[in-house]
């Protein structure tokens, strides 16, 4: 169902998160040596009073955010998805790329490959690359990046590839769009050869509440794409049920970034609050999984 949003409510929510973290004793204020200083909390209270009295913010109308399918959303995003400045990609690649570097050269599936960001990198490492995505527009870009790759349109829970046809599967920033993890992880296990690895990255559920729900704008207004709030235990449960063993799990945090977090309104009205809300909060979760050999050896 569509949901109602208001910019003032968003800003007050950021203030609230910052205050909750300060109340819990987190070192989120401007003064790293004084996490329990009253200055930070008093500044937030004063800022809240200013926000709720701001005539420009009060005069802004709220709006209804509708829903877009991933196919519709990524059709709009395809032309600008590779533009620099995507904060999730900035945090993800320093964690995922070393895992890709360590893969033995072989045949790798980039599941939900999008524009071929990871497929192109894997190709430079000498891998034979295939990709699957539900967006024809994104696949057009992937094919241009990796002409030698095999790219197919398809769904993550029904991969258009035979059993045991890959040495590794990579899936980046896409699982949140799925209603359930179990069918997808089962498919990843099916197409992997024994001893193969799956490297998965996804937005952290807390980041979805800090503005991380992907949305697109167009003639129909703002529409949000599906964003399931998977907990770490949800990934673990699905991975074990699919027969994987866990090699490693990473939760890279939000750090400082040029321009700050939260977008123009947050940076204009409450930059310190959004900084505190995001500081050291996990941005992503990254899993390295292995499909064991029949003899039980996970390597």
Image (tube, rainbow, N blue to C red):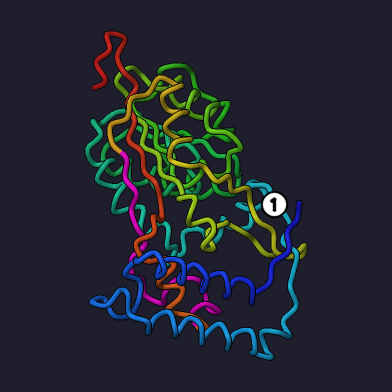
Could you say where residue 170 lies in the image, as x and y percent from the top left?
39, 37
Residue at 53% over, 56% down:
208
Q: What is the secondary structure assignment of the residue under circle 1?
A: loop
Where is residue 84? Give x, y as percent. 42, 65
Give the quarter of the figure containing the C terminus. Answer: top left
Q: Is residue 61 magenta?
A: no
Residue 93 position (above or below residue 258): above
Tell me which segment is drawn in magenta. Answer: 249-267
Q: Residue at x 71, y 53 (%)?
A: 67
Left or right, residue 126 beside residue 8: left
Dot 1 crowding, Cα within 10 Å, few <14, some 14–19, many 20+: some
User: Residue 80 at x, y = what percent?
Assistant: 53, 62
The answer to which of 100 and 50 lies nearer the viewer is 50
**Predominant SS of the magenta segment:** loop
Image point 73% across, 85% down: which residue?
59
- Residue 177's image quarter? top right
Where's residue 185, x and y in %?
48, 28
Say if the magenta span includes residue 259: yes
Count of numbered tags? 1
Depth check, front residue: 230 or 156: 230
Q: Is residue 298 left or right of residue 24?
A: left
User: In the displayed structure, would residue 129 be above or below residue 194?
Assistant: below
Label 1: which residue? 68
Residue at image coords 57%, 56%: 213
Q: Quadrant of residue 9?
A: bottom right
**157 sits left or right of 194 in the view:** right
Between 138 and 178, the one nearer to me in the picture = 178
């Amino acid at each position: 169902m569509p949901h109602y949003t208001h910019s003032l409510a968003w800003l007050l929510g950021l203030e609230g998160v910052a205050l909750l973290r300060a109340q819990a004793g987190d070192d989120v204020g401007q003064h790293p040596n004084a996490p329990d200083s009253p200055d930070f909390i008093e500044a937030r209270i004063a800022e809240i009073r200013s926000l709720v009295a701001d005539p420009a913010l009060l005069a802004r109308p709220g709006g209804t955010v509708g829903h877009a399918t991933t196919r519709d959303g990524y059709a709009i995003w395809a032309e600008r998805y590779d533009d620099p400045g995507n904060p999730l990609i900035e945090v993800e690649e320093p964690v995922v790329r070393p895992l890709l570097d360590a893969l033995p050269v072989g045949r790798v599936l980039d599941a939900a490959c999008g524009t071929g960001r990871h497929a192109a990198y894997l190709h430079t490492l000498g891998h034979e690359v295939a990709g699957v995505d539900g967006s024809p527009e994104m696949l057009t870009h992937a094919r241009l990046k990796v002409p030698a790759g095999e790219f197919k349109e398809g769904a993550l829970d029904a991969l258009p590839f035979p059993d045991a046809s890959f040495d590794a599967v990579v899936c980046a920033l896409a699982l949140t769009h799925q209603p359930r993890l179990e069918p997808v992880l089962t498919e990843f296990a099916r197409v992997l050869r024994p001893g193969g690895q799956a490297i998965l990255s996804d937005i952290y559920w807390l980041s979805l509440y800090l503005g991380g729900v992907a949305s697109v704008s167009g003639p129909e207004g703002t529409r949000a794409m599906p964003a399931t709030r998977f907990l770490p235990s949800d990934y673990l449960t699905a991975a074990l049920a699919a027969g994987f063993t866990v090699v490693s799990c990473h939760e890279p945090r939000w750090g400082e970034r040029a321009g700050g977090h939260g977008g123009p309104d947050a940076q204009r009205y409450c930059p310190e609050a959004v900084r505190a809300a995001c500081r050291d909060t996990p941005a992503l979760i990254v899993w390295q999984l292995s499909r064991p050999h029949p003899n039980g050896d996970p390597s």
